[in-house]
Image (tube, rainbow, N blue to C red):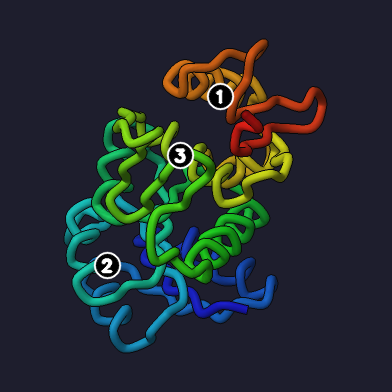
Amino acid sequence: MAVLLLVEDDASIRSSLSRSMTERGHVVHSVGTALEGLRAAVDVEPDVVLLDLGLPDLDGARIMPMLRAVVSVPVLIITARDNEDEIVALLDAGADDYVVKPFSAGQLDARVRAVLRRAAEPEPAGPVEVGGLAIDPRSREVTLDGESLALTPKEFALLLVLARRAGEVVSKRDLLAEVWQQPYGGSDKTVDVHVSWLRRKLGETASQPRYLTSVRGVGVRLAAPSR
């Protein structure tokens, strides 16, 4: 069970989401404006904020830094907008995840549980090291044998997830859920392409792997080279 703060101006959506999330065991506090949301974030002390963008008094994108100034809990954007640049900007501004309307209550519940799991994971004190690889979650820097690697945000996220489970074969479904926030599907090809790009930057190939090994029909494993 989690305490949710729903900031949504549409009364019918607000009522429907409040009811469905309550039925799933959560406690839901709902408000219809950005300013009410800021006040409630302090007063209610929620576990997760569900934030709509199209609010009547202040756009949700502008409220993100204000929310981050008063609470450190996960913020899940619920929006009808699917512009990738805007979504990336919101994630960079401090949002933890997003879901595009229309969505099912089951999907929203899964996203809530996912952000709560990530929030509960202790941040390592220093870089995650696997062989000559060092991945620093705080500075978002990656080095290989002391040389810096330039990775895209998704490449970094994929490498970090694999490094934290070094030696374990991580399924593509798990990777899609953790890196791309797609717990109910998504294309395996997305994972394959990003693994291929990572291999190139690590100086290896699928036929001659050093760190990254694909296990057909299962997933991907990151491990230190044996030689």
Image-quadrant location for residue 80: top left
> Which dot marks residue 133?
3
Q: CA distance from mark 3 to mark 2?
A: 46 Å
Which element is circle 3 on? strand
The residue that mark 1 highlights is 195
* Rendered view: 5 above or below 108: below
As rendered, which of 121 and 72 lies closer to the eye?
A: 121
Residue at point 49%, 61% (across, down):
12
**Between disc 3 and disc 2, whose residue precedes?**
2
Q: Amino acid at mark 2?
A: Thr
Where does the C terminus fall, quadrant-wise?
A: top right
Q: Are marks 3 and 1 in contact (CB under 8 Å)?
A: no
Where is residue 91 shown, x and y percent of the image?
Answer: 33, 47
Q: CA distance from mark 1 to mark 2?
A: 42 Å
Marked residue nearer the N-terminal end (3 or 1):
3
Numbered tag placed on residue 32 in the rendering: none
